[in-house]
Amino acid sequence: MLVKEIMTRAVKTITPETRLQEVASLMCLHRFSGLPVVEGDDKLLGILAERDVLRYLFPSIEDVMGGMSSLDFDSMEGDYKKILEKKAADMMTPGAITVSPDMPILKAVSVMARHNFRRIPVAEGDKLVGMISLGDIHRAIFMKSFSGS
């Protein structure tokens, strides 16, 4: 089975200019763990994941080395509102790792496992053509095993 047979083609994307407030809203309301960042004709620039947003709330290594007891975690959590003023370009991970539509799904799983991804963009060159998740792959293998094909 190939990636193109089971990938999601209607992918919600954002642009580098998308405000983090909109990104966070999409992530929370639709349970997206990450969104592809594109420009123009679906040229994939990178990914903005929940962990990219939340990492700005973590204490710096200097803060940790200075002693956890002096850290005000409630105050750090309050900084979330400041983050929402930023744009996707400020926090995205550029140069997304992708799989191709013609890749076997188990090879896609190996790429995902190597990078600890639950989902990955599907691209032809630098053009986003879909997304595939571990759930998509698991479901496809499960359905195939019971369909007799």
Image: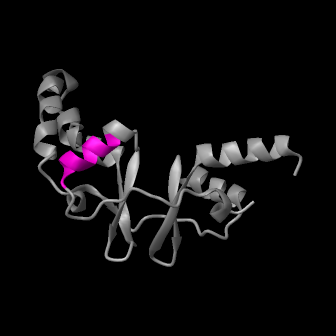
Residue 144 at x, y = what percent? Answer: 80, 47
Query: Closer to the camera, 77 or 30?
Result: 30
Q: Is residue 34 left or right of residue 16?
A: right
Residue shown at 12%/31% (left/top)?
78
Please count the marks in the image.
0
Query: Closer to the camera, 56 or 129?
Result: 129
Q: Is residue 124 left or right of residue 76?
A: right
Is 90 situated above or below 124? above
Q: Can residue 117 be seen at all in this image of the molecule? A: no
Residue shown at 37%/54% (left/top)?
35
Q: Residue furthest top?
A: 69
Q: In this view, does 118 lie to the left or right of 50?
A: right
- Span of residues in magenta: 19-27
Residue 51 at x, y = what percent? Answer: 34, 44
Q: Which residue lies furthest to the right in this view?
A: 148
Query: Closer to the camera, 75 or 131?
Result: 131
Is 148 situated above or below 46? above
Q: Can residue 37 be seen at all in this image of the molecule? A: yes
Residue 104 at x, y = what percent? Answer: 71, 63
Secondary structure mostly seen in the magenta stretch: helix
Residue shown at 39%/56% (left/top)?
12
Q: How is the image coloured?
A: one colour
Quarter the N terminus occupies: bottom right
Residue 68 included in the magenta stretch of the image: no
Residue 89 falls in which quadrant of the image? bottom left
